[in-house]
Structures are given as structure tokens and as C-alpha cells.
Amino acid sequence: MNRLSLRTAAMIAWRETRSSMVKFLFVILAVAAGTGSLAGVRGFSESFRRMLLRDARSLMAADLWVRTPDWPTPEQTAALDRLASRGADYTMIAETVSLAAGPQADEAPALVSLKVVDPAKYPFYGQVKLRPDISLRQALTLDSVAVSEDLLARVHTQVGDVLRMGGQDFRVAAVVVSEPDRMTGTMNAGFRVMMSREGLDRAGLIRPGSRSWQRLLFKLAPGTTEDSIRPDVQRIFPRSMMAGLRQTNPIITRSLDRVTVFLSLVSLIALIVGALGVGMAMHAHLQARMDHIAVMKSIGGRSREIMRIYLLQTLMLGLGGGVVGVLVGRGIELAFPALIARYFSLRPDGAWSASAAGQAIGLGLLTTLLFTLPPLLAIRRVRPAMILRRNLDEARLTWRVRWETWRASFAVALLILGGIALIAAWLADSQRMGNYFAGGLAGSLLGLSLVAWLMLRGIRLLLRGGSFWLPPMLRHGLLNLDRQGSQAQAILVALGLGVMFTHTVYLVQDSLVEEITRSSPRNAPNVILFGLTPQESAAAVDLIRRQPGVEGEPEIAAIVRARLLSVDGVKISDISLRGWGRRFQETRSVICADELSPRVIVVAGKWWSKGDPKPLVSVSEESADELGIKLGSRMELTGQGRTFEATVAAFHQNDRSRNGPNAELIFNAKALEGLPATYYGGVRMKPSSVGAFQKAMYQKFPSATVINVADALAMVEDMIDQLALVLRFLSALAILAGAIILAASVAGTRFRRIREVAILKTLGATRRYVLRLFSVEFLGLGAVAGLLGSLLAAVFSSLLLNRFFDAPFQFDLRTTLLATLVTALLANASGWMASARVLGQKPLEALRDE
């Protein structure tokens, strides 16, 4: 045989692929499920980034924005006015939370996200859409506001009615349909109210020391560049977050990066399932082509030349799946805005992302090639003499041959695992993450393979050990799981992997929500209060004590906004802080307390006595470790334009299981003397009494905010549900790929099944009987895969919840049974789809070929 050219190898590969098109079509679809999800995720990410840059002005409503937790001081305001004279006009947006009540006196007020703007300037770019269609100046006046549609339903009111906030009545002038800068806001969840600056002053909802965020929007005059004013803005607000037209919102882009990485790894799982299907299909295909391979070798064909044929065939399948996957990914990319439209009104450009498509196809080809290495390398072990010895008993392999075979298989497994680790590392831009992903995947595949082998072995022993009590149809169907070329174990692994991941997402979501909504300890507050003034705090405590349903002593603490400057003379900017430790560089809430709270446990040092004349502070253990603080250290801070110092007198731990005042830095009254403070606290009440308490607090202290923890939990649960929806949407593609692989396996054994059906029909079996017989096999495969995936999902969920979320896990028998049932039905449907031609074959046609 002459040397095989690449063109000839490609022609042979195409001819063989075309002759088995039905079988390979399922394989292409399995690869398409994985590449499609990957192309969709990365395509949407790129489209989203392009939108952020293209519509930067509209999304920010400005040329430049700055976010700061502090209200501008008179000096900062004067500096901003000087910038305005240089062509940098500005307006300020304040964001906080408050309570709003409708016209019905017997209804508890609702917690709302308040956005305060100057309608004469806001927005600089874009448009606030209102219903009815009026201008923002008309809607936001001294005594009118605009609200979100869901708030009207919550407080049972409508446009034109009265909404009460801060003890003042405001007319609902319009419903907010959309805001240009919604994504760049700080408080985007829950009911929304938009108010003018004059309305805010009238209601008195934000005071010095109140919890609020300020955003300054800048509009640059022609000739004024961002580079010319950015240094000045940075000097005015040195600890602020800033974004301009040439850079996307740092918070949004960081979140987008994390979500893209996570969803890309989810998509990679679906892609691996599809690639596993290609490997299974190629293994079955090569087993059927052993005679042809042996003949080619007997006439001079070399192993590497024959491997080239089937390598090209593998690449054809991977490329075909990749191309189809890009089309699927386009649909996924267009579906993403609908999945998250509840929170973001997105208008990506819709342009096709060639880079995302190329990445998906490339990764699809690489992953497919990795999983087809074992059957391709097995071509080297095919000997021409096997044709002459086919009907003879196989010689028993020596230990040396077995060791060499095992060693080669182990090396290939390591190569596959290393390749997956590199792909995952590239997607996550982290080798560590890639190693974790590959390790977790390897553990999952090994666990699934082992349990699948044990279950199939158990079925085999059961049926061969006296299963006369089973009906013949059931016994025959179960025996089909062990039929030659069935690849039941690999199917169980592929389908079980998809079920495992999808069920893990559900169990983690369900456990987190249940843990969040679980009844807290008996003495833990379930109602949170903030926004009380020093003059109101004592009266508020007295009102709380007189309320019915109170189950514990109210806990109230003074809160001051301050920023750490230095520790023992070392500036905070010179201290090496990483990750969450960088929070100390920003303005944060600190507590003023002379008496030791029940939630605070002193672990070192000594708590001060009431009225101590020295400025003292207690630091949480975690914060002390991060900042290198020791007992006796001097801390310098600034707040509300004043710099103050305090000596570290103690280290403490916070009881994080209880809602209420909780801080890393607790000062005595002397240290924070003269600084404006608001009061924050909590109380434990019977759930049925919370509504009446909210009304009572609102009537006497309208500017204070009372949060029913259950209401806040509902917002958190809603956001978790939205994220889980996206995850389930993608992870379901892995299950789909597994079902397609089952169909491909059935198609691969079509000729054996045709012969079996022909014999059964000749013996008198009806089409319905054969259909039931196959259903036993498919339902058995699906049920075992669903059960395996669900049980492993329970294991992984337990590990995730205990290690990363510090939440307990509870096994859910109902969802396990439901997952098993749904997977069985899905497998049955896939098997029927692939068996349609087999069931329609005439017995005579099949027997003539014998």
C-alpha cells in the first residue's frame, strides 16, 4: 500500500462518515449542545461589553461619574463649583432606603429604594421614560414622586394617589418605566421611588450620618476632556469610585467577568459530555471497522496513516458539532437578556461575535480530540492476523501486556485531564481554578464510573443468579443493558454527569434559601431599624418595649461613618491589604457603645467602663489580624471632616447568627464625641406583630426605616432564583447532551437491534411488545443515571454548602425521586427516537441478510 496522502485520508473519512450519518448526527448534536452554550455565554459577554462602551453616555447618564459614600463637604462643593466654571457641569444623585405607605391606614409600609435627583439636570444623557408620558420636571416636584409599577401593587395605590414618606404626603405623578443609569446605581433591588432634592429636604429622609450613597454625574462642555478634569475630581474625592467613557463600570465589569467565567465552566461541562459522546461513538465505530483496519494493515497500511483517517473523521464530527453549536449559541445569546430582564433593561448590539464563535469551535475540536484519543490510539494494537483468528478463542494476555496496556491508558487519562485543566484555566484565567475544575471533574467521572459499574454488575449477577421470578420481558430488557456494544456504563456516566450538575444547582439554591429563611435563634432580632436620631433613640426603645409581640430586649447602637487613616502611624495605604481587606480603605460604619452588647464577646484586653475619659476602641479579631493591630495600638480615623484617634483596648468577636448592630470597630462615647450619629438596632418580635410595629414606628418616627427581615429575605430569594434560572438553563444542556449520546448509542447498535427485532417478530412478538422491551432498557438506563446523578449531587451539594457557604445540607427525597423519574422518561424518549427505524424494519428483510 502506498503512502496515504492527506487528501485520500480525508476522502475515506468522509465516505465512512456519510455511510453512518444517522449515528454520527446524534454525536454532532451532542457536541453542539456544549459548544452552543459556550458560544452563547461568551458571545453575550462580548456583546454586553460592546454595549457598555458604545452606550457609555446613556448608561451613565453622563460623561463621567463618581460614587462616594459621604455627603460632599462645603470644601468639596466649592471645588466642584470651580470645576463647573471650567466646563464640567455636575449633578448629584443620592440613593438610600426608606419606608413608604399607601392611602390605606391599616396596611404596613413598604421598604423602598429611594433615588433622589435634580430633574432640572438629570439625566445629562439618555431619557427617563415615564407613564403617563410627562417630563421628569413635571413628575418630580416638592410634593410629587415617580414610583415603580410593583410598588403601586404593594401599597394598593395608583397614579394620582398619595404616597406617604418621612411623615409627608407625596402625590404619585407617574410610573418609572426605565432609567438610563439603572445599572450603575447602588440600590437596584426592590420597590423604587424617584424624588426631587426639594422633596428630600421636605421629608428629611437623609441626615448627616445616614446610610446613603452619592453619585456625581459630570457633563463636559465641548473642548473639555475627561483627562483634564479627572485628576481634579480624584483629588476632591480621593476614596471614590470613578468611571468614564473609555472604561466600563468597574463593578459591572468585575461582576460580568466572574459570571462569564462561572458560566463558561458550566458550559464546559456540557461540552465535555458531548465530547465523551464522540469518544463513545468513535469507539463503537472502530470496533465495527476492525476488519477494515486489519485489511488495510495487511496490505501495507501503517497505524499512523489509518489513525490519520479516523482523526480526520473525528475533526469532521467536532467541526460539524461546532458549526451547529454556534447557531445554537446564537439563540442562547439572544435568550440571555430575557432571562435577566427583570433587573436590567439590556439592549446588546446583537452583532454576531466571531471571536466567541471561534473560541467555542476551537475548544469543541480540542475537547473532542482529547476524548477520542483512547479509541484512536487503540488502532495501533490491531493486528492483521485477527481476521484469520476471529473464530478462535482469544489467548490469555500476559501480565506484561496488561501492564503496558494499563500504563498506556493511564498516560492517556492524564493527558486528557491535563488538557481539560488547561482549557478550564484559560476560560477562568486562573491555573488554580483550572486544576480545581479538572480535579472535581475527574472525581465525578471516577465516582460515576465506579457506581455505574457496580450497579451493572449487580444487575448482571441478579439476572444470572436465578431471576425466574421476573417477567420475561423485564428480564430481557435488563439483559439488554449488558448487550455487546451497548456502552451502558459510558451512557450512565454522561447522562449522570448532566443530572448531577443540574440537581446540584437546585439543591444548593434550595438549601441556601431555606437556611436564609430558617427561623433564627430565639433571641435573634428579626426586625432591623435604622435612621433614628439621637433624640429619637430613647423614645423608640420605649415604643418598642410597649409593643405587643416583643420577645426580647431591643438592641440599639449609635452608628458613625468614618474612614481609617493610619495604625500606629502607618498609613492605611502603606498596609498590604488583599481581597476583602481593602474595605478598610473606604468609609465604613463604626459603632459607638459604652455598654457591652450580648452579641459581642471580648477575647482579649478589657472592656471600658461607662464614662471613661480616654478615647478607646475594640477591634474584631479578624480585622486585627488583617491590619496587624495589637492591644495598645493607636488608630487614626476621619469622619464628617474631623480627624480623631483612639487606643485599642480590646479584641472582640461578633455573634454573626444574630441580626442587629454588628461592627468591626466599636468605640466608646469619648472617641466619637461630637460626631453626627444615627441609631441602628434590632428587636425580636412575633412575625404576626411586625406589621403593626412597622405602622406604629412609621407614625411616630416617619424618617426612620424598619425592615422586616422576611421582606429583605424575599428580595434575596428572588435574586437567587434568577441566578439559578440561568444556571439551570445551561446545565440542562449537559442533560440534553447525555440524552443525545444515549440516542447515538442506540443508533450505533442498530444492526444488532434489527436482527433481534426480526427474530422476536418471527417468534410472534408484536410491535407493542418489542416497544415495551426496549422501554425497560431505556427506562432502566435513565433511572439508574438519574439516581446516580442525584445521589452524587447530594454529596457535592453537602460539600459546597459546608465548605463554602457554611450552611447545613438536608437530603430531599422528593426531588431525588423526581429527578430519577424525569431522567428515565427523557432517556426513554431518546431511545424511542433512535429506535424508530429499527421497529419499522420487516423481519424478512433482516433475515435475508443472514
Image: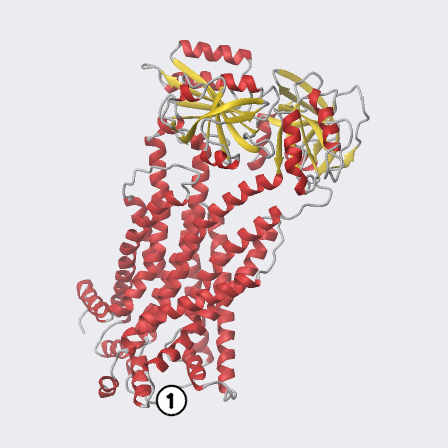
Q: Foreground residue, 679 or 204?
A: 204
Q: How far across and how far down the image is residue 19, in percent?
A: 21, 71
Residue at image position (34%, 37%) is 347
Badge 1 marks a residue whose secondary structure is: loop
Side of 455 relative to 225 (left or right): right
In the picture, which quadrant includes the C terminus?
Answer: bottom left
Q: Quadrant of residue 395?
A: bottom left
Residue at image position (30%, 54%) is 325
Q: Is residue 515 above or below residue 835?
A: above
Residue at image position (28%, 60%) is 315
| Residue 166 in view in this figure | yes
Badge 1 amino acid: Asp
Q: Is residue 774 above or below residue 267?
A: below
Crowdedness near tag 1: few (<14), some (14–19) or many (≥20) residues, C-alpha within 10 Å: few
Side of 705 relative to 7 (left or right): right
Side of 833 relative to 182 (left or right): left
| Residue 390 in view in this figure | no
Question: Would you name the residue on which mark 1 appears?
Answer: 393
